[in-house]
Image (spheres, grey):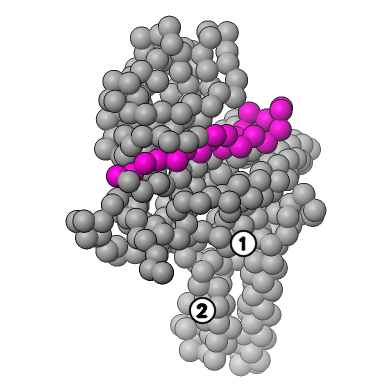
């Protein structure tokens, strides 16, 4: 009787394992589906990390049981290794470039308006001053700053001057909106190298989200840098907290859950259109380029997948760990990235967890220009 029970349990676990495999396959397929054509696919793709983790647990389970069923999760691990690399980067050491090579360090940071509005509510500007000083003294050659905030008539928030002019950096600032303090809000690119051309990709008249780009003269070679801010998830910490707190109250939980799902769906659809405009633009670039910023989508999304089909990711190629960049109540979210084209190689990728004054953590990577042999 005991043997029969064990056999039934083993078959049940095997069926569940098959279910996880099908989940992985479906999630991988859904990343290929534009959310504006079939938005439920985006939610299925969003769940893919859970399926990948469960697959690892089944792998360990069958190993402990010394069962040939281990072939099933092992096959998923091997065939889906690229997806696991998005989940967890393992790069014990990246090769440093030769000294004569041209290099470029790029910092990307959603500054959350340098906490200007948070500080105003608190009645001081200490967090803003600390954040502005941190950015302005960072050793990167290029800063790509989203939700950039500048107020020319303020000693604290005159960030164009404090970050750019004071440190003799060239800059390009595209403004998406302004406030009653005559402050400007948008995307800024600062560079120690001359900017020889610049522009902006707009996502419609009503969207504050956009992409700024600049062509940099890096010691005689031109490299294009894109600073990206795609459609926000429009989810605040209070929304997530309200959903958590409503567990146990069926009506409240349904209401909060629908609210979250509605906002996620809107973001998925908008970013699907936006990433296609971005790709259309950089495919015409005559120079090697770096695409970095706040994409507001995880590595298991249509947005990320479309970029990964065209470009390499600095975190995957030169980082270590999960690389979470969202500084909020949902852990392990990596929604800020740096992608790069052929002709460049990334090394020394970093996420700065010590700078926790924004709702995003800054990221940086160093790049070496590697001219293709003809």
Which comes before the other along the chain, label 1 or label 2?
1
The residue wearing badge 2 is 78
Residue at horizontal 71%, vertical 28%? 205
The reply, left or right, for residue 359 in relation to residue 166 is: right
Q: Nearer the viewer, mark 1 or mark 2?
A: 2
The reply, left or right, for residue 221 in relation to residue 305 is: left
Residue at horizontal 71%, vertical 33%? 204
Tell me, for residue 145, which label it has, or none: none
Q: Residues within 10 Å of mark 1 (few under 14, many from 20)?
A: many
Residue at horizontal 33%, vertical 21%? 165
The residue wearing badge 1 is 48
Determine the secondary structure under disc 2: helix
Chief secondary structure of the magenta span? strand
Q: Can residue 156 be seen in this view?
A: yes
Judge whether 10 appears above or below 137 on screen.
below
Q: Is residue 174 magenta?
A: no
The N terminus - image quarter: bottom right
CA separation, marks 1 and 2?
16 Å
Residue at horizontal 49%, vertical 47%? 291
Judge whether 51 appears above or below 328 on screen.
below
| Percent position of residue 144, x then y | 43, 36
Determine the secondary structure under disc 1: helix
Q: Does the magenta stretch include residue 208?
A: yes
Point out the stretch of residues depicted in magenta: 199-219
């Amino acid at each position: 009787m005991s043997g029969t029970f064990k056999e039934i349990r083993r078959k049940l676990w095997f069926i569940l394992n098959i279910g996880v495999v099908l989940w992985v396959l479906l999630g991988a397929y859904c990343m290929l589906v534009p959310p504006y054509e079939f938005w439920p696919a985006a939610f299925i793709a969003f769940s893919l990390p859970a399926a990948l983790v469960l697959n690892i647990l089944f792998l360990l389970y069958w190993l402990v049981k010394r069962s040939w069923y281990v072939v099933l999760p092992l096959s998923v691990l091997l065939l889906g290794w690229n997806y696991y690399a998005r989940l967890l980067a393992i790069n014990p050491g990246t090769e440093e470039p030769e000294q004569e090579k041209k290099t470029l360090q790029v910092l990307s940071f959603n500054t959350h308006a340098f906490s200007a509005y948070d500080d105003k509510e608190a009645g001081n500007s200490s967090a803003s001053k600390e954040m502005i000083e941190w950015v302005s003294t960072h050793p990167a050659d290029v800063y790509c700053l989203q939700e950039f905030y500048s107020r020319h008539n303020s000693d604290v928030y005159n960030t164009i001057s404090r970050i750019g002019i004071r440190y003799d950096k060239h800059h390009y600032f595209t403004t998406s909106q302004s406030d009653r303090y005559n402050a400007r809000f948008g995307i800024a690119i600062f560079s120690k190298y001359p900017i020889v051309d610049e522009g902006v990709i707009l996502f419609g008249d009503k969207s504050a989200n956009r992409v700024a780009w600049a062509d940099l003269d890096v010691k005689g070679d031109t490299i294009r840098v894109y600073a990206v801010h795609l459609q926000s998830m429009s989810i605040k910490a209070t929304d997530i907290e309200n959903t958590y707190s409503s567990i146990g109250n069926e009506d409240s939980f349904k209401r909060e859950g629908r609210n979250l799902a509605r906002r996620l769906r809107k973001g998925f659809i908008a970013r699907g259109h936006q990433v296609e405009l971005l790709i259309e633009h950089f495919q015409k670039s005559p120079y090697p380029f770096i695409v970095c910023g706040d994409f507001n989508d995880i590595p298991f999304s249509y947005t990320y997948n479309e970029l990964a089909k065209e470009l390499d990711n600095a975190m995957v190629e030169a980082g270590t760990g999960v690389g979470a960049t969202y500084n909020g109540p949902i852990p392990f979210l990596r929604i800020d990235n740096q992608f790069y084209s052929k002709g460049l190689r990334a090394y020394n990728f970093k996420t700065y967890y010590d700078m926790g004054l924004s709702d995003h953590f800054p990221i940086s990577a160093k790049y070496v220009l590697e001219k293709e042999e003809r």
